[in-house]
Image (tube, rainbow, N blue to C red):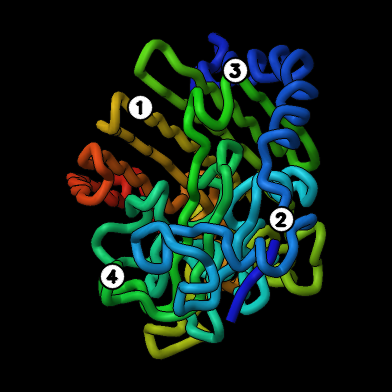
Amino acid sequence: MFFFNFSNPLKLNPMKKIFTLFVVLAAVFAPLSYIQAQEDSENYIDMSLEELLNVQITTASKSTQNISQAPATIFVITAEQIISRGYINLEEALEDIPGIEVQRRAVTQTSNHFSFRGISGNDKFVVLLDGIRVSSVVGTPHVIANNYSIANAKRVEVILGPASALYGADAFSGIVNIITREGGEDFSGIEVSTSYGSYNTTENNISLGGKTGDIKYSLTGKYYHSEEPNFPKEYPDEYAWFNNQYQQNGGQVLLAPQTGSDSIIVSAPLVDFETPTNAYFLHARFNYKGFEMGVMKNFESHNSSAGGRPEYNIFDKDATYNIGITSFYIKNDYVTENKKFGVETTLSHGIHELKPESKF
């Protein structure tokens, strides 16, 4: 990094089938994909200062320019660094950048809470994918967790500071642009990664790219699931109310403090502590002689009691906050033969949805 000033108990779940496929393919392709990524990565570490100043970026002004000409504080995370540092999602990559603070599981709606240069709020910055907005299209706080894959990222450009003139009023604290590898140009073949760890946590990524005639394509898919830690067991003092009052007295909780009283005890359903997290990410990109089409769809579900005090909340597996984002675009680049005149036309459409199955 460098910078400048899905339930079916009797049948195999489709997601489990996908996971099994991931495991099989990973054993075959993972070593090859790692080598290929290492070969294709831009090796900024060995560049001189003059070469670094001539590295080209696109996020700061929506056009290609040398990094030395961009009037912004810019961080670039390369594909090689994503591999070497073990980033598995956008959240982890951003957390490693000076000036960005991430408070995990701190807010009911967004779970993770971000601050860019001290400016707090997930609605104060914009996330782009190949220059197209893929964060909330209506300016509401968006979820940045396991729902954004960087498995096929060529690089991630991060601009710290206001960019509202170019990207809208909600681009107040910064811009994050995930620039993906173009099939046939940057890579061809298939890359798979899979992991399994504590709390039945699994993360699976697959990327496919290539070229057929004049058609270049790339496809990326990701699935994440975690049952998350059992906090009453891990932190018995902090969850004393849950262990001693809620469980021992048949589901007693306190009314929320917003009611004007923090001492009224009410009865609630008695359930086990379950706070699962699920997410997926799908992205497809096609290019034909300068005409490009892309679609992105992601989903994230987390417990809606995240970040709340145990005495006021019910940590039920069905109490979830579910967010889905869909983005579609078509783009055409026309440049005259003498390359003195060009026109770029982009049409995009985005949907930001709070799923009806969400419960609080």
Query: How far separated are the C-alphas under marks 1 and 2?
Result: 28 Å
Precedes in sequence: disc 3 or disc 1: 3
Residue 305 vs residue 205, the one in the foreground: 205
Q: Amino acid at mark 4?
A: Leu
Residue at point 42%, 41% (across, down): 298
Q: Amino acid at mark 1?
A: Phe
Q: Residue furthest front?
A: 338
Q: Residues within 10 Å of mark 4 (few under 14, many from 20)?
A: few
Q: Secondary structure at mark 4?
A: helix
Q: Residues within 10 Å of mark 1 (few under 14, many from 20)?
A: many
Q: Amino acid at mark 3?
A: Gly
Q: Is residue 297 left or right of residue 356?
A: right
Find disc 3 in the rendering and name its residue.
Answer: 189
Find disc 2 in the rendering and name its residue.
Answer: 44
Find disc 1 in the rendering and name its residue.
Answer: 286
Residue at point 64%, 13% (across, down): 21
Where is residue 214? Give x, y as percent. 35, 17
Quadrant containing the C terminus in the rendered view:
bottom left
Precedes in sequence: disc 4 or disc 3: 4
Q: Secondary structure at mark 2?
A: helix
Question: On screen, 77 above or below 14?
Answer: below
Where is residue 357? Give x, y as percent. 34, 44
Precedes in sequence: disc 4 or disc 1: 4
Q: Residues within 10 Å of mark 3 (few under 14, many from 20)?
A: some
The reply to whether callout 4 and callout 1 are in contact (CB within 8 Å) is no
Find disc 4 in the rendering and name its residue.
Answer: 166
Quadrant containing the N terminus in the rendered view:
bottom right
